[in-house]
Image (spheres, coloured by chain):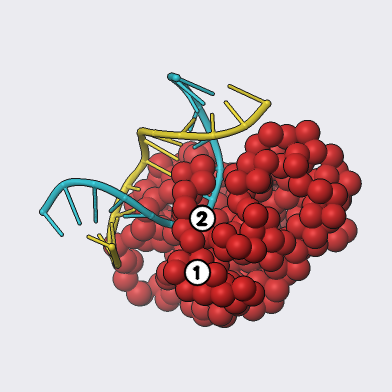
Chain colours: A red, B cyan, C yellow
Amino acid sequence: MPELPEVENVRQGLERIVVGKKIQSVESRYPRMILTGFDDLKAKLTHHVITGVTRRGKYLIFEFDDEFRLISHLRMEGKYRLIGLEESIEKHDHIAVKFADSQLIYADVRKFGTWELISADKLSDYFVSKKIGPEPTYEAFDESIFLKKLQHSTKKIKPYLLEQTLVAGLGNIYVDEVLWRAKIHPETIAKVLTKAKVHLLHDEIIELLGQAVALGGSTVRTYANALGKSGTMQEELKVYGKTGEPCVRCGTPIEKIKVAGRGTHFCPTCQK
DNA sequence: CGATATGTTTGCAA
DNA sequence: ATTGCAAACATATC
């Protein structure tokens, strides 16, 4: 489901609804999704207060008044919502974190999402071991490092950007959009990109993801943030889901192909 | 109605 | 070293 802008909007919603709440108990009908073990998580979280919700790339991080952190990845369809203690659980609800007056529900139709509880001092190691690249901001995302990596890679640019190692947060929608904005064909071999193109791509990644965060993310299927609100970024999309429609820049019909197994939308005229 | 697709990540085989 | 595929799973669409 979500790429960085959607995860960031979920984070903002969660921050407003769960920070300061004390956990009374945790229940799960699908404990397998808790990779570090449900019993351990239940024992550690119970009676502790959620002190913050942060994010790294597409990962959500819950902070507590103790030395552990909960890393939550929504994968394709993970969702959070806050409901009353008396409200009934629905079909795809997998975890309930109960507070005195409400409960936070994690739901996930495809059961791909994961939770991991790790000690606070291992948090940065976690992202290092997963090789997660910098956040897509001008401060964190170093263009010269980006250029250097691209210049000695024979990978295709789209799948490379999806790896999360060059920069964190791009998924299938925004990678297609950013390549259209930078006028780069998704199958271009990384090392043949000119320095000027890399510069443009770097800036477009930051601008696009920033704009998408500001607009509340894209709602193309069923995405809504933790407050049940949908975003409006889908109105700004130029190629994703636009197969056969004229390119807004040149009028050529947008084509859809498969690149590295992913549906890929692009303009065959603008993106050579 | 069977095949195919879906906003993700990981691991293995070629 | 890179890429292709399958797997984790459920549902909507072609």
At horizontal 62% and vertical 73% (from top left) the residue drawn is: A250
- Give how far apart the Cα atoms at labels 1 and 2 are: 14 Å
How many marks the image carries: the answer is 2
Frontmost residue, A12 versus A261: A261
> What chain letter is assigned to the residue under label 1?
A
The x, y position of residue A249, in whole percent, is 64, 74
Frontmost residue, C6 versus A187: A187
Asked if residue A158 is positioned above or below residue A238 in the image, the reply reads above
The x, y position of residue A50, in whole percent, is 64, 62
For numbered disc 2, what is the local secondary structure? Answer: strand
Residue on which disc 1 sits: A253
Asked if residue C4 is positioned above or below residue B7 in the image, the reply reads above
Residue on which disc 2 sits: A264
Regarding residue A225, the answer to whether it shows in the image is: no
Do dots 1 and 2 share one subunit? yes
* Nearest to N terminus: mark 1 or mark 2: 1
Residue type beneath disc 1: Pro
At horizontal 76% and vertical 57% (from top left) the residue drawn is: A201
At horizontal 69% and vertical 66% (from top left) the residue drawn is: A181
